[in-house]
Image (cartoon, rainbow, N blue to C red):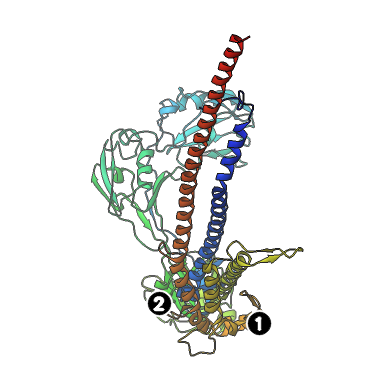
Amino acid sequence: MDLQVAGLVSGFDWKSMVDQLSNVERAPQRRMRVEQRTISQKNSALTKLKNELTALKTSSKTLKETELYDSRSVNSSQTHTTASAQEGTSSGDYRFEIYQLATAAKQLGNTDVGASVTSSAALDSAGFAIAVTEGTVTVQGKQVTVSTSDSLDTTLAAIKTAVGGSFDYSISSDKVTFTDSSTVVLGSATDTSNLLQALRLNANGTSSITSGANIGGMNLSKTVDAANFTDGAGSASGSFKINETSITYAATDTITDILDNINNSEAGVYANYDTVNDRFLITNKTEGDVGITLEDVTGDFLAKTRLLTANSGALSRGNNLLYMVNDNGPLESRSNTITQNSSGVQGLSVTATQASGASRISSVDTSGESVTTVDSHNYSTGDAVTMYSPGSLPGGLSSSTTYYVKVTANDSFTLHTTKANAEAGTSAVDLTSAQSGDVYFLDSSPKKATISVKSDTDIVKNAIADLIAQLNKVQSLISSQIASSTDADGKITLGVLASETLPTEIARELRSKITGDVTGITSTIKRLESIGYTSSGYTNEISLSDSDKLDDALRDNLGQIKSLFTTATYGVGIAMFDYLDNVLDDDGAMATTQKNMTDRVTDITKQITDHERLVQSKRDQLVRSFVAMETSQAKINQQMSFLNARFK
């Protein structure tokens, strides 16, 4: 309806006038947009305040939880012992003496589980424990080509031919022997075949060298029925149990597959093949003197691997950790981590990585009055020892007596009741019978460490500091949002939330809860001022004015500080948390205020839209009127032109 050029006929720029009138009509909209912008700024300011209050709520939640004050810090005097403590562990020093580390038990399969090498068969199918690779090998400086399609007989004959002279070889008992009139020199830096390693031959500086172990063994890449067992081919498929966990193998599974299945099962063991000793081993994944149960269910895998006791397999027992704590013991732990289950110290866990001082008796010579130990004892004559036994001591000895040793060998000694007698080798203790079960000698040089457990006051101190810092941040933010400022011309500018009551109310409530006495406390620490926090009196912020006072309270009165923050209903941590929880709740004051503001912004948007519709309606009406005027003026002009033309 609007003309592109207003006043084309009348000469009157009525469009500009209509725009100006419409702009005047929009004055209420401009006031509403100012109000809308102000409300949005307030809402944004409240959102920022809400975020800071949420952080303050988190800080107060930390301090209201009683577990915070039961936290413990732990320190070990030695790096070979580490420790941790649960909340509430009794504070104090715990002196640990570690005599023996825990080790895992092993089921050792009998050796020579793999059949001997077939010297007439091709190298790649002869049954070597270490698979032979093709290439070259050097003996006595002569290089020979090794092909895995040749037999061992053919290959050794080729070496003999290459070396010549008095050089010879023999194959017996699954071992190879090289002899010569001069020192046998094996290998060179350019060898590319591992034949010498597969034959287990190592230079020894003599004219005769024999394999250090049997050269035949298991081919782990083969299935059970084709893996070269000494006791014949095993059942192609079957199942067995380890520690009551069932392991099943199929006809297509290789020995490696079966070992992997064991290792990945719930049996709690590692299974592997020892190529040096040609035997299988099963090792517990956990330390300690615990057994391993084995059973063939169908098939004969465990029997063929010679792991079963019936097939000369044997359990190599694991060791328990031997230790003392605060002179109590000796005690035992099945793992190298000592827990309350063995030490009796509730909540304390200690892990040891080194030990010394324990020697287990192997045998007793009642006629020679000497003791033999399982391993080297590392004692010197005159060393003092005591005895510990879960079984029974040898006759003539007492666990309450300190003895002195006279070393007779690295694994044997006699016992004496005085150091002088031990050094002189006189008056040895009369041993009347052997021991029963495990018996240990413990010397005076175990690995020692002191574990110090104390209340973790630093974590409490930091939590209080975090609360105060966040509180001050909130109070500072509120102050900046409600404060008024005056410029050089005396113009006063109100803070964005100066007209809102909620921020002022929050600031007042927080100050009251942080600075007042806690109701229900009868001890000396009733308020934050008692632990060194004070207010200047001019702001709602507080600060630590006496750090020594806080440190003293944390050290001497942690229980009172705990009450200050955790006393039901009125404790600083609880009161702050509960108040903020209500303010920040979905139906709380903050949410209600912000919702009202959001609703008001939405309502103003609707009012602006409605008002703009009215303005546009009036503008359209004016435009139509002026267009009509222009149209009438055009018709009049046409008529005048017609009349002028007729009467000339």
On screen, residue 552 versus residue 632, left or right, reads right
Q: Position of residue 313 (x, y in %)?
A: 34, 51
- Where residue 551 sits, quadrant-wise, is bottom right
Q: Position of residue 506 (x, y in %)?
A: 52, 71
Residue sitting at x 62%, y 41%: 205
- Where residue 80 sits, quadrant-wise, is bottom right
Q: Secondary structure at mark 1?
A: helix
Give the farthest residue toward the right: 488
Q: Nearer the viewer, residue 273 or 329?
A: 329
Image height check: is 171 above or below 93? above
Q: How far is mark 2 from mark 1, CA to CA?
A: 61 Å
Provide the residue designation for mark 2: 394
| Residue density around tag 2, few if under 14, some if 14–19, many if 20 or more, within 10 Å | many
Comes first in the chain, label 2 or label 1: 2
Q: Nearer the viewer, mark 2 or mark 1?
A: 1
The tag on residue 328 is: none
Q: Nearer the viewer, residue 458 or 49?
A: 49
| Residue density around tag 1, few if under 14, some if 14–19, many if 20 or more, within 10 Å | few
Q: Nearer the viewer, residue 589 or 516?
A: 589
Q: Secondary structure at mark 2?
A: loop
Provide the residue designation for mark 1: 548
Residue sitting at x 53%, y 74%: 510
Instruction: Identify residue type, mark 1.
Output: Asp
Q: Judge whether residue 18 can be spotted in this image.
A: yes
